[in-house]
Image (tube, grey):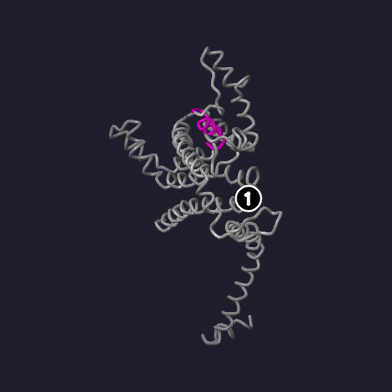
Amino acid sequence: MSDTPHVTGASPRARRPARRRRRAADNGLAYGFLTPAISCFALFSWYPLVRGVILSFQQVNFVSDPEWVGFANFSAIFHDPLFWTAWWNTVKFTGIALAFGYVVPFFLAVVVNEMRHLKGYFRVAVYLPVMLPPLVVVLLWQYFYDPGNGLFNTVLRGLHLPESQWTQSPRMAMVSLVLVSTWANMGTATIMYLAALQNIPGELYEAAELEGANVWQRLWYVTIPHMRFILAVLLMLQIVATMQVFIEPFQLTGTTNPDTITVMVLIYRYAFTVNHDFGMAAAMSVLLFVVLGAFSMAYIRLISREGTRA
């Protein structure tokens, strides 16, 4: 009690150093708490990124000493026919995956949201595949696609329909991979759509019904405008995720199938199977990083613009 009159009665010039010392102490404490997290982030995220860029300008096989080769790695992969095949397959996979994994979960969420009974059960059923490890999912679908005694061909035989080679067929291979990826990841998108649907005021649907709007008009004029932000965010996230597809083509069709080889599989092929050239693999990774960085910047700008509006 005796110090209070002395502090409150001090002049502004006398209180300024104390305020600076308190602010410096607070900042020091904050940086102290942040240092372990920043150190881990720098060690496991920034250092590999910088190291990968350096490797892209070197000839590296981890047996002999690295040799600087300038842009030779980039030139080599641009002249590799598999480079363009891998990018085309990646774009094709992304396009088909968006058609299945972006649109279907939206309508599934609308249907589940309209259900009056067993809504919780269907939420769990939709999200269940997300909890399975990716390798388990691929091995499960590998059994489904087995051309001999697989589940799908057994069903087709029972229905007296022609069997399919699934992952071995040039016409069906890419679609087969997309179905695996969509089934495994559809639950996350559906749950996010459901959360956004439940934030739409019910009065808007009641007003639309009074105006005589049918189901599709309520969907077009009420649901989609109010979910515009989450639709844009999920579109960006799914593009970034599907362009990095690896385990499905790697496990189901291997690294040599030109019908399903993707950019990530080609990176693996450069580094570990054919060339054993980590410089070319790093150069390919840098190109993929640039493309995904453009989509990530668009995603960050979208989030920032929505945060400014809020």
203 inside magenta stretch: no
Front one among 297 and 266: 266
Q: Amino acid at mark 1?
A: Asp
Give the magenta-colored segment's residue range: 171-186
Residue 248 visible in this rendered orientation of the protein? no
Front one among 194 and 159: 159
Percent from the top left, x then y, of residue 35?
65, 65
**Which residue is painted at 55% across and 56% down in the image?**
72
82 w.r.t. 3: above or below: above
Percent from the top left, x then y, of residue 48?
62, 57
Quadrant location, the C terminus: bottom left
The residue carrying pointer 1 sits among few (fewer than 14), some (14 to 19) or many (20 or more) residues within 10 Å by Cα, namely many
Q: Is residue 293 left or right of residue 55?
A: left
Percent from the top left, x then y, of residue 209?
32, 33
Magenta stretch: dominant secondary structure: helix
177 inside magenta stretch: yes
Which secondary structure lies at badge 1?
loop
Front one among 289 and 209: 289
**Which residue is painted at 52% across and 16% down in the image?**
162
Percent from the top left, x then y, of residue 47?
63, 60
Can you identify the residue that label 1 sits on? Answer: 277
